[in-house]
Amino acid sequence: MDALDRLNERVAAAERRVGREPGSVTVVAVSKGRSIEQILECYETGHRDFGENRANELLEKAVVLPADIRWHFVGTLQSNKAKKVQDQVDLLHSLVGDRLAERWAASGPETPPVLIQVNISGDPDKHGLSVADVAAYATRCRQLGLDVRGLMTIPRRGNDDEIRAWFRSLATLRADIAVGPELSMGMTDDFEIAIEEGATIIRVGRAIFDPRSGS
């Protein structure tokens, strides 16, 4: 899959630019809206991390695709779908709100780990906690027994300097509140900046899969 090879080369180059170890970044292939055949083509190259942002689409795909896929849920999740999703995923990237945290914790200590979603750019149209609320929420999640692995963000559109500043702020926040090692940040248009600012996970769709008709 040439597109995935090109992406991996760009990821490796970004890691080298800032002196990071090769392979320090997990690439999540965001497969929302993609066919089973497209996902299998990517899978057959050896790629195993895939992301979905709709619960029903994730559940439909997970039952027919290979069992060794590591599924990441990267979209807004309604609390009433938490149990079905957590039975399929390896990591929830978008934990926000007490109700979802409580539902996610209800399955006990074997529930998959989570990332807390932060609205790092303060965009009213974006999902996520305000920076000021993250520390207390992380404490609450740990009290519920959740395995909080780190933070996730989707900043609003901006120039490269603004995006870099937002990613740097998320990295600083993670360090300040000692919330875990993972930083899920960066997508097709900004993943190289994210890697340079400490991303451990990037979520990429368009740079891997052929653009969808009309998108």
Image: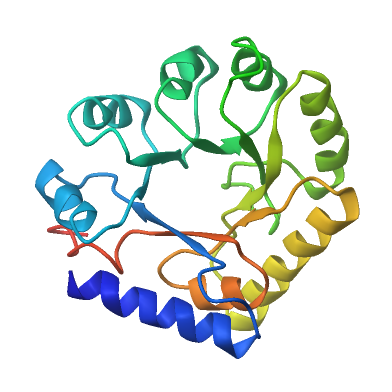
- What residue is rendered at 22% in x and 59% in y? 215
Image position of 6 (left or right of 211)? right
Quarter containing the N terminus? bottom left
Residue 53, horizontal then vertical, whole percent: 40, 39
Residue drawn at (68%, 67%) of the image: 167
Q: Is residue 201 above or below residue 105?
A: below
Q: Residue 18 location in percent, x, y? A: 65, 85
Count of labels in the image? 0
| Residue 100, horizontal then vertical, whole percent | 62, 20
What residue do we see at 43% from left, 20% from top?
87
Looking at this rendering, what residue extends furthest in the bottom direction?
Answer: 17
Q: Is residue 172 rendered to the left or right of residue 99?
A: right
Q: Which colouring convention does the figure follow?
A: rainbow
Q: Quadrant of residue 97?
A: top right
Q: In the shown orientation, is residue 173 left or right of residue 65?
A: right
User: Residue at left 75%, top 63%?
Assistant: 171
Where residue 5 sits, quadrant-wise, is: bottom left
Query: Which of 70 and 102 lies nearest the eye of the viewer?
Result: 70
Above or below — where is 105 with respect to 121? above
Question: Which one is in front, 66 or 114?
Answer: 66
* Near-viewer residue (6 or 31): 6
Q: Quadrant of residue 108?
A: top right
Residue 35's x, y, as percent?
A: 14, 44
